[in-house]
Amino acid sequence: MSEDDTALLAVKGVSKRFGGIEAVRDVSFSVARGEILGLIGPNGSGKTTLLNTINGVHRVSKGEIYYNRQPIHNRAPSWLLRQGVARTFQTPRVFQSLSVLDNMLLPTIETGLRDEEAIDRILESVALKEKKFWTASQLSGGQQKLLEYARALVSRPRLILMDEPFGGVHPEIKAVMQDAIKRASREEQVTFLIVSHEIPDLLQLCHRVACLAEGQILAMGTAREVTADDRVVSAYLGRRYEQHA
Amino acid sequence: MKSRMLMMVLVTAAVVLVSWLLNSGIVSLFVPIAMYLAMAQGWNLLGGYGGYLNLGMASFFGLGAFGAAIAAVNWNQSLPVALLVGAVVAILGGLVMGLLSLRLRGAFFAIFTFVSVFVLEAIANTVGITHGALGITLPTFSSLSYNTLTKIWFDAFIVLGLLATVVVWLVERSRWGSSLVAIKEDEPAAEVLGIRTMRVKLLAFLFAALVGGLAGGLYAYQQQFIYPSTIFTDTVTLQVVLMAVAGGGGSWLGPVIGTPLVMGISALMRLIVGSVVVFGNGIPAQLELIIYGLMLVAVGMFLPNGLVGLVKRWRGRSATPAATSERLEARGA
């Protein structure tokens, strides 16, 4: 049995073209159940485009994407959510005029998985239970990121795509989120694909890391292997992360 | 919830009862307010909560009016059947318009719905079934006096208006309401959360069509004579939008406040400005449109969230997050 057959997510030869620009070029990789895969790379390397393509926001120009051995490329984001693929964004996209609870209930509208006890548990795990009835606009930027992550968990996803979850977040909130991610991966076998520029965070959080440059995967492996790769150092890091590797 | 519903029923019954105690001249002043309350609530779901500027309420109104009139005159149907036909025609029209336009966003959706009014007017002026530009004269209720009829029409419109208000009130507290707010704030993010945005928007659009169609059908009977240029007119749309946004779009209370307010200001302005002759007689002839246009600009500039938004902002400034939290908890959010 090949690695792709056991993987939860398999991306096979995916390219995404915008007119004359090929933002993602023939990218292939797979992510196992419960794995946390980090995606690093310089700005404009195609990381967010790749997430958007997996998530159905963009149609693939070429290639195939499999989730649980089922083809999912070009399916709508709402359909993907019902299959267990959730998503968070670089800038938290919580609904400002709704309460924290109403934000949490939104994904249950179509999935029908309304379980207020579970919602309370999730909110508690990200230290937002006390703010359940606050409107989202009353939360800080970091708390809004936590809310967005908590909201992604409500639909009981098997795969969560996260775009810059730690960018500009207070260290305390970052620690809460990292604990929650590790717990979900370890205890519930939730799979994560995390785009981030916060290299030290990814090094201690991710099982594997992939580096994207000019739309192609430059290197993929353990954090130690990738950060030691000369091509990654040259294209992105600029120096070696000796203290973490 | 049950007590609030009971209260709405009692309020409706009380308003109906009072209408029979008042002079029909006074009641006649409130007939357009009751009609526009219904229309503004119909518009409110998609326009106010969902943030889709629907400028096609006159299309639904006209489809309902002509649907009912054709059923009554061409097919000799009774009033209830004619109203039902009008509502069905408006819903079918809404379905076609919605499927074509709800994938558009922002100004493109607004332009599509705005243009629909002129397209339907042109069709109604051309085809034989609507009697073209000559219009349709509906059956009269000769056994009933003018006074009685005025009160009956008021009651019919006010019941429609209050029913529409109850529906909007219920939606505001439902997941459908949250979905519409999510669509207004960030539609792509709402899609990522699994919300079937097209279905949610289409349902809200069809609610506007249903209420607009019923109001149009009742209006046709009340006026007894309709022709395309007075029914498919942007004045209807402009008034509906203004009444909803002046009170506060995205709140069930908005149209309840906005409709009498706008009608009152409009009547007052007509009295004051109407007596002043500016640039000959041309200006007074278009005075109503000028007043509504100016009011819409003023609301957009100074009250973008309407009077309800103003009160909310004032309460929000004076409330701590904890106080807001208590309020929401008490509301059972």
Image: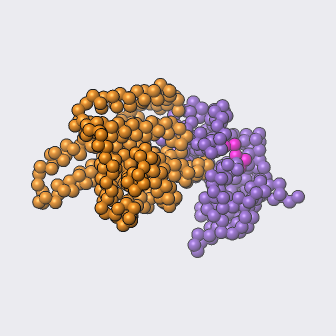
Number of marks present in the image shown: 0
Residue B128: x and y in percent read 38, 65
- The answer to whether residue B222 is left or right of residue B321 is left
Query: In the displayed structure, would residue A121 be above or below residue B225?
Result: above
In reply to whether residue A120 is colored magenta, the answer given is: no
> Hey, which residue is sitting farthest bottom in the picture?
A20
Q: Give the camera-side residue of B217 and A81.
A: B217
* Scheme by which the image is coloured: by chain
Residue B202: x and y in percent read 51, 52
Q: Residue at x 29, y 39 (%)?
A: B144
Residue B37: x and y in percent read 36, 41
Q: Quadrant of residue B129?
A: bottom left
Q: Residue at x 68, y 50 (%)?
A: A85
- The answer to whether residue A48 is left or right of residue B248 is right
- The answer to whether residue A16 is left or right of residue A134 is right
Query: In the displayed structure, would residue A235 be above or below residue B189?
Result: below
Residue A41: x and y in percent read 65, 60
Q: Is residue A189 visible?
A: yes
Q: Is residue B57 visible?
A: no
> Hey, which residue is sitting farthest top in the picture?
B3
Q: What chain is the orange one? A: B
Q: Give the camera-side residue of B316 and B169.
A: B169
Q: What chain is the purple one? A: A
Q: Give the camera-side residue of B246 and B87.
A: B87
In reply to whether residue A156 is colored magenta, the answer given is: yes
Q: Residue at x 88, y 58 (%)?
A: A1
Query: In the displayed structure, would residue B294 be above or below residue A188?
Result: below
- The answer to whether residue A140 is left or right of residue B241 is right
Q: Give the camera-side residue of B301 and A168.
A: B301
Q: Residue at x 66, y 39 (%)?
A: A113
Magenta region: which residues?
A154-160
